[in-house]
Amino acid sequence: MQEQVIHTEKQDKRQHLLEVAERLFAEQGYEAVSIRHLAKEADVNIAMVSYYFESKEKLFRTLLESKMPKTRAILEELLASDIPSWEKMSKVIDMYIDKFFVNRAFHRIIMREMSLQQRPEHVQLIADNFARNMKIIRGIIEEGQEKGQFRYVDAELTIASMFGTISTAIYNHKLMCMLTQQPDSELVYGDEYRERFKRHMKSMLQAHLLLKAGG
Amino acid sequence: MQEQVIHTEKQDKRQHLLEVAERLFAEQGYEAVSIRHLAKEADVNIAMVSYYFESKEKLFRTLLESKMPKTRAILEELLASDIPSWEKMSKVIDMYIDKFFVNRAFHRIIMREMSLQQRPEHVQLIADNFARNMKIIRGIIEEGQEKGQFRYVDAELTIASMFGTISTAIYNHKLMCMLTQQPDSELVYGDEYRERFKRHMKSMLQAHLLLKAGG
DNA sequence: AAAAACTAAACAAACGTTTGATTTTTTCTT
DNA sequence: AAGAAAAAATCAAACGTTTGTTTAGTTTTT
């Protein structure tokens, strides 16, 4: 067991640095995390950051690129599949909630990065990825509308609602705890809450999107 | 005309500093805005910040307190009023969208502050205010449910959706532009988009909340 | 013996803040 | 109303830290 710890911690300090950096950046923001702070937390020498990543900026970019999720393939497959439109949306909801809940530290970083827009390369990278995914989801909604399964809602803002609800739940941790009247902790991201969250999202978007049979 | 400029800029440098600080903090985040940067942008001497506000921290706190919105009174009045529950929710939506759109720079700061949770006093201040408001809105939803006007939806997460949609639209500026396929600018916060946003929110929450007559 | 990994110490630059002097405004006395 | 005294506002320069990064040397691995 001790050997394993030494193994995983010493074999790849680079990876270890990335992991600690992800946590710290998510917790405190890019500017607030100093190299010294990061090095101490990761228990490596200060110079190792420059040694492995050249600069703090490039460490950040490496982190971003290494974790940039490849969701598009799944979404495209979903769009092309031969199931009712609502089932597609339901699966989109499941996937996004799972993805965001599991990688919440990373998504917090992404959101802050998009909000500040200080590093144009990152903004471009994230934005492009996001734009493509959103286009597919809009495709699903419009397909449902054309097939007479969905109401003619504002597709773009419907996506904003789906994405916004999940984003805020992840990003604004404290708010989520307060809303669900849970003592402040990461418990709101547990399995129980995640299922509750999925139920709510599906219930709301179903009511919003689906044409009632008796309409 | 020149006299007026001199008048407004010189009469209260303190206020001017606060206004520039609000813009810069919203744009770049607390840590990224240096005193020198702020002083230069506001065209005052570096020492004036400490002279008026003691420290950067207290400047930030002053900004927060001076802009902390007093929404509760309006909400409480709304809850007590004798109109259908949906009309109450509709007014809540209008008020929140207007409030957030107009003071979006301030709300971006608040959201970042809540996400990072680095200054406990600020978090407490914002959280308390928020908690009270959310309790009232939950009251409106539960009242509608008891009166048989609303479905028994997950009230807490419904609020999360309302708040989350608006928050993300304000906070994630770029995302909003991309979703609405608008060239990047503050145009998505113009009157036209604001009305569209209100229509969407009401449409979605109405479908979600309202019991269909023929159910 | 060569290469890679690692380290302590030092670097200039930028940070928030303070100092001490100077200018401007206000207040009070004549 | 005029001018001296007091107060407030403003400034350039410097304070001690901390920042990200580099250096030059040591240890470890290949």
Image: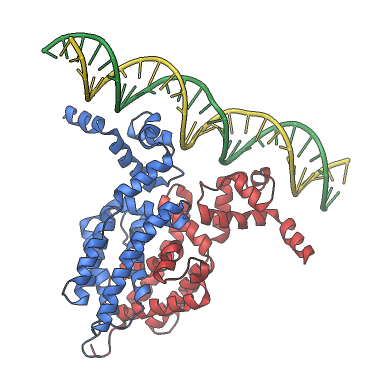
Chain colours: A red, B blue, C yellow, D green
Residue B133 picture quarter: bottom left
| Residue B98 visible somewhere in the drawing | yes
Residue at 38% from the left image edge and 70% from the top image edge: A162
Q: Is residue B94 above or below residue D29?
A: below
Left or right, B150 with reference to A140: left
Left or right, A69 with reference to A90: right
| Percent coordinates x, y for residue B123 in the rendering | 42, 56
Residue B42 picture quarter: top left
B97 or A56: nearer the eye? B97
Q: Tell me how many marks there are.
A: 0
Residue B23 picture quarter: top left
Left or right, B119 with reference to A212: right
Q: Is residue B139 above or below residue A28?
A: below
Q: Quadrant of the N terminus of chain A?
A: bottom right
| Percent coordinates x, y for residue B137 in the rendering | 29, 70
Left or right, A70 with reference to B35: right
A123 or A193: nearer the eye? A193
Q: Quadrant of the C terminus of chain A?
A: bottom left
| Percent coordinates x, y for residue A185 in the rendering | 51, 66
| Percent coordinates x, y for residue A153 in the rendering | 27, 74
A38 or B15: nearer the eye? B15
